[in-house]
Image (cartoon, rainbow, N blue to C red):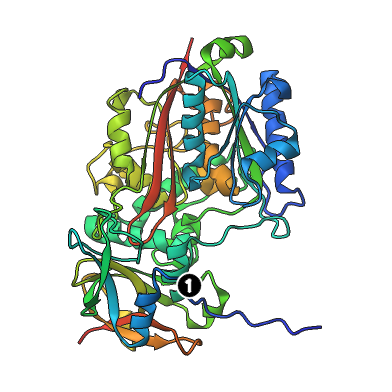
Amino acid sequence: MRRKRVCFVGYGSTEYSRKSEEPQLGHYATAIRAALNQTGLKKKDIHGLSITTQASPDTAPHVAEQLGFELDWVLNADYGGAGGVGAVRRAADAIECGHLDVALLVGGNSFDRSVAHQRPLEYQRGNFVDVYGYGGPNSLMALIQRLHMENFGTTLEQIGKIAVAQRFSAMNNPQALFREPMTMQDYLNSRMISDPIRLFDCVMPCSGAECLVLASEEKARQITDKLVYLVTDAEKVHYQVADMLPEKTTFGMKLVGEKIFSEVKRESIDLFEIYDDYPIAVMIQIEDFGYCKKGDGGKFVDTHDLTYNGDFPVNTGGGELSVGQAGLAGGFLHVVEALRQLRGEADGHQAKKAERALVTGIGWLNYGRNLGTTVALVMERRK
Amino acid sequence: MAEARAPQKSLPKINPVDRPFWEGAAKNKFLLQKCKSCGKVQFFPRVACVDCFGELDWIEAKGTGKIHTFTLVRVPRNPAFKDEVPIYYINVILDEGVIIESRLLGENKEKVKLGDRVKVRYEQTHNPEIKLPCFELAD
């Protein structure tokens, strides 16, 4: 669906850290404070709040009460890595319906085990996966990567190029936990975790939070002169759910992409902020979006420069692979980075042309298939 | 001070929906759900047909199939498995046409490749009433 009058007006991020004494709510507060400072909005101007977290007591009403928000709209946007873009869609609906003029969307996690209350594994993963000694999401994505490599001849160097390019972009991003250069040899030599997934295919769990502010166009004009519009957005939940022999190397993003590109031209995108829990997931999404044929993702990355100043800039701040994954803040990182770029505020890693960005979220690695939640949006800067 | 308890291997928390499956496995039978309306066979166990929402029966599978994909787990999520790494974690396409996530066992598992034929093998767990259906390469 094409959006008409919803804008991104601000953002806020915390520092990311491996070990943090800060409780979860403290990370939220820091990210929210940064967003309020940037927009000049006061807490009482916020009538809508969305929370995305893995820490189960931190449902949205609980967080609203703790942080003192009186609201007309509250949302627990709990869709795994699709939580960021998913929250944007729902807030945009509420704004277009007139329920709200401003919404604050927050995602984050604290990996301090004394405060984090991880939710139990969902039923089928507990009873039919965990019992075999699997290695978490790393193993489930490894099953997909092996098929891509065997069926299409994709090489480790092609997959690794995504991680290496993103690291290059992260080197001048002060938020990134990993800023030292990474070579292809570093990638190839990194420790095997769940063959063929290596250490440098995996994100670093960390603590932190991200906040986004959405507003109606009318309200946005009062807040900022850097108008960034939500253009269109789409999602697919549980693609192929009734297919007992699903196509494991195609995500629901294929159908999401068809909807997105019925509204905007595929060739008109400047920036690709693609959810990157693993490099292979980025490659598969590039294929699903039709930038190349299914299976040709390896050849595609061979012939494109994926760094922030390249011809096909992917994850211009380094993505989750180099910045770190603060739990479900991971799904917000890509939206915030796109917003920074479109506002011209990505100091040190600003892309040359940044008018229109494609942003995705994926989540819910599931039994026998691939991703349960796939969602994407296009946002653009307008004068 | 109490001694730290050694980690235990994960066991299924059997519920009314999947109890027939686990009772079958305890008797060396691999049970799948089949829809009474449309005939679709499905796994994992659910409360209704994932396709047409019909009611379900249980059927016995042959317990044979082929390797769809696999990974060698070096870092198991549950540390109780760490002495057994690498764990050959597999997706099998059963001959009945459903994907099963499981584990490959047997002396010759290092030779595994995509498409290899496999057959089920029931492993006793530390709970005497629960067996886990695993697989080994068929000759």
The residue that mark 1 highlights is: B74
Q: Is residue A212 visible?
A: yes
Q: Position of residue A216 (x, y in %)?
A: 53, 16
Which residue lies at the image location 77% right of the left edge and 52% below the top edge?
A: A21
The quarter in which the C terminus of chain B is drawn is bottom left
Residue A304 sits above or below residue A124 on the image: above
The quarter in which the N terminus of chain B is drawn is bottom right
Q: Is residue A357 visible?
A: no
Q: Chain of mark 1?
A: B
In the foreground, A98 or A107: A98
Residue A213 sits above or below residue A182 on the image: above
Q: Position of residue A120 (x, y in %)?
A: 56, 61
> Left or right: where does residue A300 sit relative to residue A71?
left
Secondary element type, mark 1: loop
Q: Quadrant of residue A141?
A: bottom left
Q: Position of residue B46 (x, y in %)?
A: 35, 63
> Left or right: where does residue A14 sit relative to residue A88?
right
Q: Position of residue A92 (x, y in %)?
A: 49, 25
Count of numbered marks = 1
